[in-house]
């Protein structure tokens, strides 16, 4: 078993001009890419297996990130199922010259552990060490059930002969 603390991960990134949109803020896609990467590290630390992104839930952009700011992405595992893991990533930004660190976003990412054949494979359970972790686990379990019920009601779109979805 692994604890929440043993799989935590952080990425610190300086924003640069190639990250900018026309308003001088960092593209949301740049933020999402870093969220995906740090969630992957947490999932790998927990499972010890290769992982793939299954879904992004509840992505919230709370404030813009400006060029030249330092952005920190902190991730921790909140729920573990059979082969899936839910990761919470919290995003903060700060000016290098000083000033307060402010929360600018968050997301829940579901990662799935896969074996050498590319198919989902079981992961070890999560060792919950305090009431906050137990509460987050129960909330994560409820979100997972909601995702399952949503998937069960969705009709898959057929692939075209070329393999792409219309």
Image (cartoon, grey):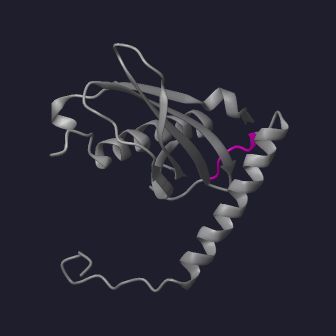
The answer to whether 41 appears left or right of 21 in the picture is right
User: Percent from the top left, x then y, of residue 58?
Assistant: 52, 57
Residue 69 visible in image: yes
Please say if 129 is above or below 53.
Answer: above
Residue at x 49% of width, y 41% of height: 39
Q: Could you tell me which residue is drawn at 49 percent across and 27 percent down?
A: 10
Residue found at x 21% / y 83%: 161
Task: Check the image and name the residue furthest to the top.
Answer: 97
Image position of 92 with respect to 152: above or below: above
Above or below: residue 157 compared with residue 51: below
Prevalent SS, magenta region: loop
- Residue 97, percent from left and from top: 34, 13
Q: Is residue 99 magenta?
A: no
Residue visible at 16% across and 31% down in the picture: 17
Closest to the observer, 12 or 42: 12
User: Does residue 117 appear in this view?
Assistant: no
In the image, the segment drawn in magenta is: 122-126
């Amino acid at each position: 078993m692994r604890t929440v603390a043993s799989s935590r991960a952080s990425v610190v990134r300086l924003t640069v001009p190639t990250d900018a949109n026309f308003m001088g803020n960092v593209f949301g896609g740049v933020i999402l890419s870093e969220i995906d990467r740090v969630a992957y590290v947490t999932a790998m630390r927990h499972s010890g297996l290769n992982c793939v992104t299954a879904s992004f839930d509840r992505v919230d952009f709370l404030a813009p990130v400006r060029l030249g700011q330092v952005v920190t992405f902190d991730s921790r595992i909140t729920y573990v199922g059979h082969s899936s893991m839910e990761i919470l990533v919290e995003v903060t930004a700060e000016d290098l010259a000083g000033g307060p660190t402010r929360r600018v976003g968050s997301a829940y990412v579901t990662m799935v552990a896969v074996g050498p054949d590319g198919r989902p494979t079981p992961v070890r359970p999560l060792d919950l060490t305090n009431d906050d972790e137990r509460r987050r686990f129960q909330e994560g379990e409820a979100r997972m059930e909601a995702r399952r019920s949503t998937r069960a009601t969705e009709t898959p779109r057929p692939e075209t002969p070329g393999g792409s979805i219309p």
